[in-house]
Image: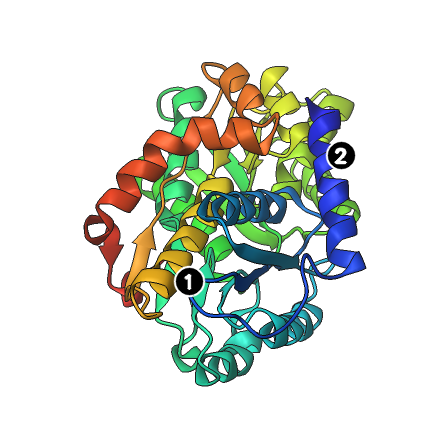
Amino acid sequence: MHARLRTTAAALGALVLLGAVGCGNNSPGKNGKLNMGIAVANISLNFAHEMVLGAQSAADHAGKVDFKAVGPPNTDGPAEAQLFQNLTARSRDGIVLENLDPPIFTRPAAQAVDKGIPVVALDTSPTDGSKVNFYVGNDNYALGELMAKEALKRLGTAPKGEIVIGVPNPGTPVLDNRAKGIADTFKKEAPNVKVLGPFQTYSDPGQNYSSWSAQVNAHPNALAFLGVGDADSYNLAKIKKAEHGKWLTAGFDVDPKTLDAVKDGSNFVTIDPQHFLKGYLSTAMLIDAVRNKDGKLPQGWFLSPGGVVDSSDIDEIIARQKSATAAYAWYKPTIDKLLANQKANLKPLKDAR
C-alpha cells in the first residue's frame, strides 16, 4: 500500500516539475475543454498530495478539464506565489489555491480575480484584500478540540502534569486554530494540566524531527506531545519508539508513516482533515460554477468535515489510502451529500477558523 502511494506521489511531483498537463492558454469556452489548476504550499508533503489527488479526481470525473497542479518541493510562500502567478497565465478558467502564508497571496489572488479568473481558497481562508470570497475548509479549532478530547480519554480522571503543543508554521491560521482548540480544551476540562507552547516544529521533516527531539529532552515527564501538522505525527512516533517513551503522541493527517504509527499503537490517534475530500469538493464546485453558473462561485465558507483515525478504523483508512480510486469510493457518499445541499454547509467567511 505504502509503496503504491509513494509511487503516485513521486509521479505527481515529476508531473509538477516537468510542466503542463496539457497545452494552450486560451479556453474554447465553458462547453469545451476547461483550463484549470491547483496551487499548493508543498507538493512533497502528504496533506498537499491528498488535496491534489482529490482535485484531479473531480476534474477527471467532470470531463473535458485540462488540469495542472503546482507547488514548491518545500514550504516556501514566495516560491508558491510565483508558481501561482505562472498558473494564472495557463489556467484561465479557474484555480484552486491552498497556501500556508495568506498575506503573500493577497495581491496575486486579487490580480487573478481582476483578470476574470474564478479562484477558490482551499484549506486556508483568504485575506480580506484578496477578492476571493469562497473558501472550502475544515473547522480547525474543532479538530483541535477533537484531538484534546481523544487525549483526555486516555489520560484518566483528573490528569496532572504538562502537555507540549507544536505548530509547524506559526502564523498560519489553519494550524494556529488547531493548536488553540487543543489548548483551550485542556484548560477547560483538565485545569491541573499545564499547556506548554505552541512551539515551532517546522514543516520540513528533518527540522521537525530535531525540534521535537529538543522538546522531548526538555520535558521528559510530559503527559503528551501533540502536533498539528503532517510531519509532527510520524516524527513524534519515531522519537517515542527510540526513547521508549510512555507519553502520548499524536498529530494530524494520513501520511503512510503516520498510519503505521497508529496501526502499531505508537500514536494513539491521528486527526484526519480529509484533504482528498476538500480537494474534490473545491474543484467540483469550481467546475460547476464555470459550466453552469456563469462563473459565479458561492459566497462564504464551505465547511468540510474531518475525523479521528484510531485502532478501531485504521485498517479501513489504510485501505482507503491505497489509491485515488479507493479514496473516491470511500468518500463518495459524503461528496454526494455535501454537493446535493451546498447551502446547508455554507457559513459566513468571517467565521472561518
Q: Is residue 116 above or below residue 274?
A: below
Question: Residue at image x 53%, y 47%?
Answer: 196
- Looking at the image, how many numbered discs can be counted on the residues? 2
Q: Is residue 124 visible?
A: yes
Question: Residue at image x 52%, y 43%?
Answer: 57
Amino acid type for the residue under numbered disc 1: Asn
Q: Is residue 60 above or below residue 321?
A: below
The residue singled out by tag 2 in the image is 7
Neighbours of disc 1 within 10 Å: few (<14), some (14-19), many (20+): few
Instruction: Report whether 288 appears left or right of 38.
Output: left
Neighbours of disc 2 within 10 Å: few (<14), some (14-19), many (20+): few
Residue 352's disc number: none
Instruction: Report whether 18 appears left or right of 319.
Output: right
Front position in the image: 258 or 178? 258
Question: In which quadrant is the C terminus drawn?
Answer: bottom left
Residue 339: name its quadrant: top left
Q: Is residue 43 above or below residue 84?
A: above
Which badge, 2 or 1, is on the more N-terminal residue? Answer: 2
Q: Position of residue 28 (x, y in %)?
A: 51, 70
Q: Position of residue 188 (x, y in %)?
A: 31, 42
Instruction: Report whether 316 appears left or right of 255.
Output: left
Q: Position of residue 238 (x, y in %)?
A: 73, 29
Q: Secondary structure at mark 1?
A: loop
Mark 2–mark 1 CB contact (< 8 Å) = no
Give the distance between the C-alpha atoms of the residues marked 2 and 1, in whole angstroms.
34 Å
The residue singled out by tag 1 in the image is 31
Q: Secondary structure at mark 2?
A: helix
Q: Is residue 146 above or below residue 248?
A: below
Question: Residue at image x 40%, y 42%?
Answer: 143
Q: Is residue 220 visible?
A: no
Amino acid type for the residue under numbered disc 2: Thr
